Amino acid sequence: MSQISNKLPKKSYFWLLLLAAIIIHQIPIISVPFKWLESYFHEISHGLAAIATGGSIVRIELFDNGAGLCTTIGGVRFVVAFMGYAGATLWGVLLYALGSSSKKIAMLGNGLISVLLALTLLLWVQDLRTFIIIGSLVLLFVIKLKFGQLLALPTIFRLTGLLVLLNSMYSPLYLLDGRSLGDGATLAQITLIPELIWVLLWSVLALASLYTIGKKS
């Protein structure tokens, strides 16, 4: 696919990748690893926000269906709650940007994400299911690092970034289940701004990121 990218105009290449991401997103089995990845970025964003505001991570859990949980202590509660979905969007943008950068920077970014995943396994994973899921993600990034040229690393980064952004756009909508649970409900409790507003804000943020990427292409 990297050869195709050299022949197509940048705008056409972007829309081709986005179409591929939308199709993959609709295929249950194939889309699962990407949902795990978006869930990981969501949870680690909670954790990093806690650490950045003076708190700490207790544990990170990922579930088979793409859901997750990050248990933290301390930190600024508003920032920690907000940065889950917002952070996943930023990770998606970063992945796409790595695919648009030089091979050296892409390989470096791939290595740093691999290290972050490995540290998560060592420091904050306490159950076998999460260990297997994150271990699988580590393996995927290590394979990309080792065989980057063979696997057309820039294209894979861009496609992965688009899939993470699509998941970031759709996943906040699951909060609108009437149960008042999750990050939106937490922010509504802190700010008195309705949960719906936060859900829309996260989805619009992901959509705006997709639009910006497409426009710059």
Image: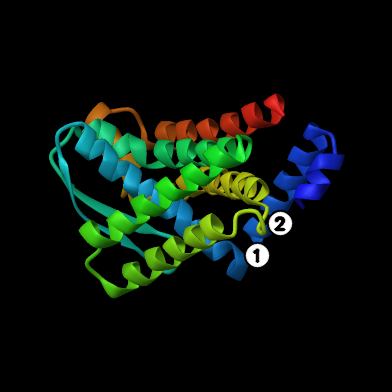
**x 46%, y 35%: residue:** 90
Decide: is 214 above or below 37. above
Location of residue 71 in the rendering, given as x and y in whole percent from the top left corner:
21, 52
Q: Which mark is residue 191?
A: none
In the rendered image, which quarter is residue 29 located in?
bottom right
Residue linked to disc 2: 23
Q: Residue at x 29, y 35 (%)?
A: 187
Q: Is residue 121 above or below residue 191?
A: below
Disc 1 target residue? 27
Q: Tell me which residue sits at (16%, 44%) in the image.
A: 56
**Residue 35 visible in rendering:** yes
| Whole-percent x, y for residue 97 in the image | 57, 35
Q: Position of residue 28 (x, y in %)?
A: 60, 67
Q: Nearer the viewer, residue 70 or 120?
A: 120
Question: Above or below — where is 181 with respect to 15?
Answer: below
The residue closer to the viewer here, 160 or 69, is: 160
Relative placement, left or right, of 104 versus 135 is right
On the rendered structure, is 50 left or right of 98? left
Q: Are marks 1 and 2 in contact (CB under 8 Å)?
A: yes
Q: Local crowd at mark 1 within 10 Å, few (<14), some, or many (≥20)? A: few
- Amino acid carrying mark 1 in the image: Ile
Q: Could you give the CA–CA distance between mark 1 and mark 2, rounded to whole angstroms?
A: 7 Å
Q: Is residue 83 left or right of residue 99?
A: left
Residue type at mark 2: give it. Ile
x and y, in percent, of residue 131 in the image:
32, 69
Give the colour scheme shown.
rainbow
Identify the element where label 2 is drawn.
Answer: helix
Q: Residue furthest right?
A: 7
Identify the element where label 1 is drawn: loop
Of residues 155 and 66, the one nearer the viewer is 155
Q: How many marks?
A: 2
Number of residues whose C-alpha sits closer than 10 Å to that of mark 2, classed few (under 14), some (14–19) or many (20 or more): few
